[in-house]
Amino acid sequence: MENLIDKGKTTIAPDVLLTTVRLTTLQVEGVSRMGPVPARVNHLFRRGYGEGVLIDIRDNTVYTEIFLVLESDVNIRDVSRTVQREVGRAISELIGMDIGRINIHIEDIDYPENSED
């Protein structure tokens, strides 16, 4: 009997990648929310665009731009590196694609509202 597993093919929709990147990012401690993708960038990436995330796929390699708003009083470098590590792990281990680049863009910091104001 032939091995039918070797006869098939799996394709992954860009929306699956976008959702994976977004949900993985939001689970990192210190990330408040996804940031807006600047309008000038939207025009460059007509495909692979979702809330706070841009992806470009070339030869089974994923290139990612992530736009974040962080919580106040966090180490920006540490949070950024953690996001890169976790998103890279999710793309390579869960989805099985190669990582070309994961760029992090800090768009803002969420400061708690002061109750005295």
Image (spheres, rainbow, N blue to C red):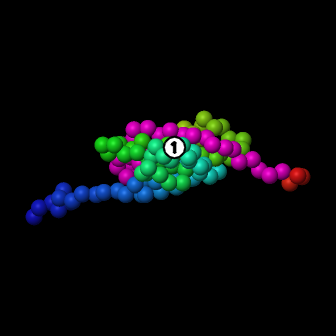
**Residue farthest to the top, as pictured:** 77
Residue 50 magenta-highlighted: no
Residue corresponding to mark 1:
41
Q: Residue at x 54, y 40 (%)?
A: 104
- Quarter of the rendering occupied by the N terminus: bottom left
**Residue farthest to the bottom, as pictured:** 1
The vertical placement of 18 against 4, above or below, is: above
Q: Residue at x 54, y 43 (%)?
A: 40
Q: Left of 110 or right of it: where is 14? A: left
User: Residue 95 in the image: x percent, y percent?
Assistant: 37, 52
User: Residue 5 in the image: x percent, y percent?
Assistant: 20, 60
User: Residue 59 in the image: x percent, y percent?
Assistant: 30, 43
Task: Examine the rendering and report whether any part of residue 67 can be seen.
Answer: no
In the foreground, 12 or 7: 12
User: Residue 56 in the image: x percent, y percent?
Assistant: 40, 45
Residue 89 magenta-highlighted: yes
Amino acid at dot 1:
Val
Q: Residue at x 34, y 49 (%)?
A: 96
Which contiguous range is marked in magenta? 87-114
Q: Left of 111 or right of it: where is 14? A: left
In the picture, residue 11 is in which quadrant?
bottom left
Task: Examine the rendering and report whether any part of residue 58 can be seen.
Answer: yes
Q: Residue at x 39, y 41 (%)?
A: 99
In the foreground, 76 or 11: 11
Mark 1 surroundings: few (<14), some (14-19) or many (≥20) residues within 10 A? few
